[in-house]
Amino acid sequence: MQPRLLKEIQSVRVLLGLVVLQGVLGGILIIYQAYDLADIVNRVYLGHENLSQVQYLLENLLLVIGLRALLTLFGESGALSLATRVQARLRLRLSQRILDAGPMYVNREQAGELVNTLIQGVEDLEPYLARYIPQVAMTALVPTIILIDVFAKDWISGLILLITLPLIPFFMILIGRQAEAKTQKQWSLLSRLSAHFLDVLQGLTTLKLLGQSANQAHGIERASDQFRQATMASLRIAFLSALVLELLASLSMAMVAVAIGLRLISGVMAFRTAFFLLVLVPEFYIPWRALGTRFHDGLGGMKAAQRIFQILDAPQWTKAFGTQRLSNVEAPLSFENVSFSYEGRENRAVEEVTARIRAQERIAIIGPSGSGKTTLLFLLMGFAHPDSGLIRTGDTPLESVDMTWWRTQVSFLTQSPYIFSGTVRDNLLMAKPSATGQELHGALKTAGAWEFVEDLPQGLETNIQERGRRLSGGQKQRLALARAFLQDAPIVLMDEPTANLDAETEASLWTDLEKLLAGRTVLVVAHRLSTVMHMDKIWVMNQGHLVQQGTATELESEPGLYRELMQAYKMPNQEGVG
Amino acid sequence: MARYLGMLKPYKWWVILALLAGIFTVASNMGLMATSAYLIAKAAQHPYTILLLWVPIVGVRFFGTSRGIFRYFERYISHDVTFQLLKELRVFVYRRLEPLIPASQGTYHSGDLLSRVVGDIDVLQNLYLGLFSPPLVAVFTFLAATLFMSAFAPALAVALAVFLLVSGFVVPYLAQWATKNTGRSLIRARGVLSTQVVEITRGNIDILAMNQEKPHLHVIAGQIRQWARWRGYLNGIKGISSALMLLLNNGAMWVVLVIGITLIDRHRLAPILLPVVVLLTLASFEAVNQLPGAFQFQGQIKEAVIRINELVDKKPWENQGGVDAQMVLAEGNPPRVLLRDVHFAYDDKSLESLRGVTFSVEAGRHVALVGPSGAGKTTLSGVLSGLWAYSGGEALFNTVPLKRIYARDLPHLASVVEQEPHLFNTTLRHNLLLAHPEATPEQMEQALDIAQLRQVVASLPEGLDTVIGEQGTQLSGGERKRVAIARVILQNTPLVIMDEATEGLDAMTERQVIHAIRRWAQGKTMLWITHRLSNLDALDSVIVLNRGVVAESGPASELASHSGVFARMLSAEKPMQWIEDVP
């Protein structure tokens, strides 16, 4: 059981209550139906009554059947709606949490896996919520009602049921525990095997180049066979619990049948009671059996629930800020002993960084990959708080500033800007919802994007496919640039915007980028020497530390990482290439 | 669908056993109910000795036990069959896809599509359990129940048959009909929702940076509501169909009861049989009650089959073959590569990526292949490594046309460091050994040295035996590239193609890697694809590709002094010039 999932169900407890109530009422009706049926059979068989004499009983029976059908209608759709509601709520909360956690969390997860959990994982909860949970409640109630009734009619049969009753959960737990652990392991193996297969398919090109693609068919066959054998070994036990239940049910059914049969002969018991018991006794075990199967069906949901709650526990990094709106961005921007570490990583991503950026100053951050450059930008975007230290704009700590306002004052250009589904216009208006047509046109022109937008089938109104598939890297950058022009913010942060472009495109993009940077405060993560050349000052990062800062000439004259990096770029390359 | 059912053929005895076990399970239940009803009915006649009850007592015991055992075997065998089918499906799909990828890369390589295939196979594996077995078991138990019943009275058998048929086929059919459109809408709603969720994950930075959280959440909430509405309708239909099934199950019992009483009135049925037929009726519905599920499943299976068929029925391109690697390298020398008017188009014939490429690279030379993005450089590397078949002209290794070389031998001749190499979710060691399964420890060391991976390996928690995650996510982009380089070192072919092999490495590492590779590749023919033009002087020559044709070629210094594509690109690249541009 997932205690947190149970807590989720609190929100639909009325519905759950109704579903369980329906189950209990259904159980009572089953008893009545058995009673009525036994009465009819008794009257006809032993009392030799004819159709018209039992007519009212038959009518009652039909009524009960109709009522049961009605209850089932409500019970079934109610249980499913219960699941639907919980699923809808969880989906919305997961979406909310992904946004609240922000890129510093999301970038470290696998986007595909997050999407899958939100869509398929939540979908998998249905059997667990709609079938298993109500079944647990009904298994506790319905057999008890039946038991009480059986006791009232015949204490010996009641005793037989009572004796077998604790045996069922006992065996379920005894066998089930072991089987459950094993089955759960197998299910995760199953999904891992699917993942393995997917991995092989996705790597087919590479396998081909390495000359290994033909061998993999055997690999897949072998892996599948091993998996099958391992799974069957554990299923042998898992199914055993069902067998034991089944045997227990049939055996006690047989015991009841024989016990009442013997007493019928001696005339101690009436046929009516005997037949009633015979019809009712299987119903006593049905909820238990259903519980077993539904538990099995719900396993996938239980696994999904673990991951769902893991995501719901993600840090709300982007939310931990204040509400202060300043009239203007105050200079300088300063980092004071700023440190940040990601969960589960030993080394800090950024450690004790102290530096300041004056108004309209342009700074390039360079350093080996993983040295904390992007983290520094993210912290300045307010995607998370530093663990310690302060970031200030003027004298105001960033943590007390309203981030919605702050982000209108900062433009952010990434390596591969995301183009959202919708039209070009939709994508531009995100940066400035109130922009007029003329402003859009102007921004596109300045960003050098007007030409290709004009060439699109419906110009500004062209629907760009998901992930901007129809646009080249350079075109996407220009759209992002147009967004930045519209936003017209005093601070521009960039994460190597030319990283994925070739030299010619890069050079022409820079002429347009320069128009944006003029008169603004700029902080850019640079991978290329060409980008560094556009900046006033350079920060050199290494393993989370800011190890050097200064102008290019200053840094050139002192020994350190900068000189090493530059030499690698500039020294005539004996070996050639690059 | 038949072809996939056909995959069960090797396991036909198991399938038959599972079906029999399934039928006997239901039959045992009918037997149990019938014999126990008979037992107490007989007992109620107060027979003078218990021995008269002996047969029904044994029957009750037998059926009570056999039911559980049959059920156990049914589940066990049918699961085994399912896993066998899963294996067959995977191997089948892999065998069909293997020659197709990446020949049809343009349309089929997207990760989404492949993960959908894997999902579809997961659906299809339940072909037996979900679709094949329930109707067969239902039909057989239907026959058994009606035959059994007709032994008591034909009228009862007819009534039972009608109810069984209606609940087994009419109700599921109606339910399916009523939900057909909703099912589709639901899938669509899910699709839209998943696009939205992709945006909040992959577009996370842009959404936050532009304060777009609220609008996005608003859209998502709307989609979820839409999804919940469709789902609500479906839930209602499911409720109605369950209610109808219950009505028919118990309705059949009621009708049998009424007919039975009428028959008894007319002395056409022994009164003692009344409890027997009533309970038998209830028990005979067990198999039929599984059918609505199977009907629903049928829709899913159908769609999965359509999608998989679409994929596996593509005709693959095959090498003619006839020449092996030994014959190509007659004297043990590296190959001379010669291209004459090579043409290639991905999908659309009108849009050729290579429009008549002609050049030659002499044996053992190291040549750069440069050009603006979209010039056809990567396409060329795919053609030379045999991934894609050129449509016109000829490509030769020494004197042998590429198309005549056995496909299985090409990886022994040419190796490629891909632009986006795939790393498998296993250990680093396994990822490397893929290139040369029998590599010695010394060879491994050498590859790690050349690719500058030593430090990386040392920093990993379990060294070479560290699992590097899906797509190698435990490694950085530059580290992944270096793993690909190490693979090519291990593969050790006479022709080496480096496709932007050092892109994404930091400058210092890059220099070291290039230095080491060039030393290692002495005596190999090497094609160095890059979009960076400075420092190409040390290479033997440069081939400039532009819009699918060779624009110019020659030593770098020579090209730089001409006023061609190369010179123009080179000037764009010179960082010094940009400094002058800065106002």
Image (tube, coloured by chain):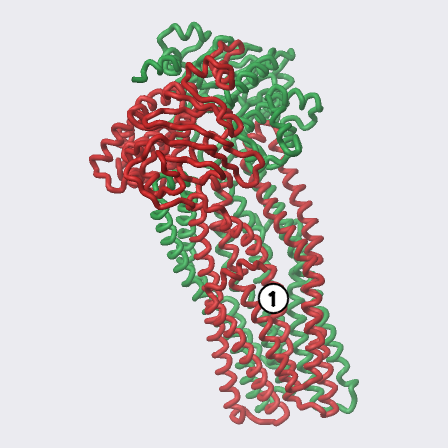
In which quarter of the view is residue B545 placed? top left
Residue type for callout 1: Leu
The residue under the point 69% across, 77% down is A162
The quarter of the rendered structure image containing the N terminus of chain A is bottom right
Give the quadrant of residue A294.
bottom right
B411 vs A358, left or right, is right
Q: Where residue A576 appears, x then y in whole percent?
A: 51, 11
The x and y percentages for residue B328 are 61, 16
Q: Which chain is green?
A: B
Looking at the picture, tell me which residue is in the foreground, A480 or A299: A480
Instruction: Kindly identify which residue carries mark 1.
Output: A291
Question: Does B488 sit left or right of B561 as displayed?
Answer: right
Observer-nearest of A274 and B343: A274
- Residue at x 51% of width, y 39% of height: A108
- Name the subunit of mark 1: A
**Residue B155 in view, yes or no:** no
Colour of chain A in the image: red
Q: Is residue A119 left or right of residue B121?
A: left
Question: Furthest-front residue in view?
Answer: A395
Q: Could you tell me which residue is drawn at 60 percent across and 32 percent down? A: A213
Q: Position of residue A76 (x, y in %)?
A: 49, 68
Q: Residue at x 52, y 87 (%)?
A: A58
Residue B337 vertical placement versus A224 (above, below): above
- Crowd class of label 1 (few under 14; some 14 to 19; many from 20; radius 10 Å): many
Give the structural element (helix, strand or loop) at label 1.
helix
Q: Is residue A373 above or below residue B62?
A: above
Image position of B255 with respect to B522: above or below: below
Confirm whether residue A523 shows in the render. yes
Query: Where is residue B481 shown, x and y percent of the image?
Result: 54, 26
> Viewed as shown, does residue A209 lie left or right of A435?
right
